[in-house]
Amino acid sequence: MTDILRRIEAVIADRRAALAADSKLAGRSYVARQLEKGPRKLAQKLGEEAVETVVAAVAEDDAALAAEAADLLFHLLLVLGGRGVPLAAVLAELERREGKSGIDEKAGRRT
């Protein structure tokens, strides 16, 4: 199930490395163009995609929700990749939480 996410993560890492070597790449790649904007703009775009996903969840059909959720996941991967945080770290955190009560898990988080 996560193979597509890992493939997207690899593309983002490749574009990030290529952008560091050749700043002209941003004009030819959506991913590079987004990465070039920096973490603040990446986070802003992620927020926009989150809002669009919420709107689709309450006001649109299932296909629209799936499309917006795909955009949200893609832009989350961009934020992670822009910061150099591997998807594996997110998956490991989910695995760490698995089987725990959500209430207990949240109470045990560092503040």
Image (cartoon, helix red, strand yellow):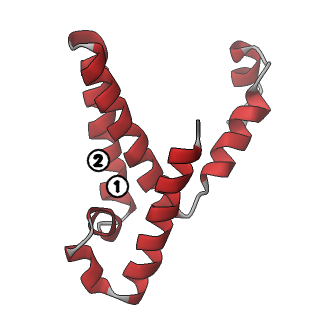
Identify the residue at image location x=32%, y=71%: 36
Give the secondary structure at mark 2.
helix
Q: Amino acid at mark 1?
A: Leu
**Quadrant that contains the N terminus:** top right
Residue type highlighted by circle 2: Lys
Dot 1 and dot 2 residues touching (CB under 8 Å): yes
Judge left or right: residue 20 versus residue 101.
left
As measured in the structure, the alpha-carbon distance from the residue carrying label 1 to the one carrying label 2 is 5 Å
User: Which residue does the image show at 24% across and 13% down from the upper left?
Assistant: 61
Q: Residues within 10 Å of mark 1 (few under 14, many from 20)?
A: many
Q: Is residue 15 above or below residue 92?
A: below
Q: Position of residue 34 (x, y in %)?
A: 30, 62
Q: How many numbered discs, if any? A: 2
Direction from residue 62 to residue 60 in the image, left or right: left
Tag 1 residue: 42
Left or right of 29 on screen, residue 105: right
Q: Secondary structure at mark 1?
A: helix
Callout 2 crowding tier (Cα within 10 Å): few <14, some 14–19, many ≥20: some
Residue found at x 32% / y 69%: 32
Q: Which residue is mark 2?
A: 45
Mark linked to residue 33: none
Quadrant including the C terminus: top right
Q: Residue at x 69, y 16 (%)?
A: 102
Q: Nearer the viewer, residue 48 or 8?
A: 8
Corner quadrant of residue 2: top right
Point out residue 93 in the picture as x, y percentages from the top left corner: 71, 39
Relative image position of residue 107 (x, y in whole percent): 73, 21
Residue 96: x percent and y percent? 78, 34
Above or below, 74 relative to 66: below
Between 92 and 111, the residue placed more toward the observer is: 92
Task: Give above or below for 85 relative to 29.
Answer: above
Which image quadrant is residue 60 in? top left
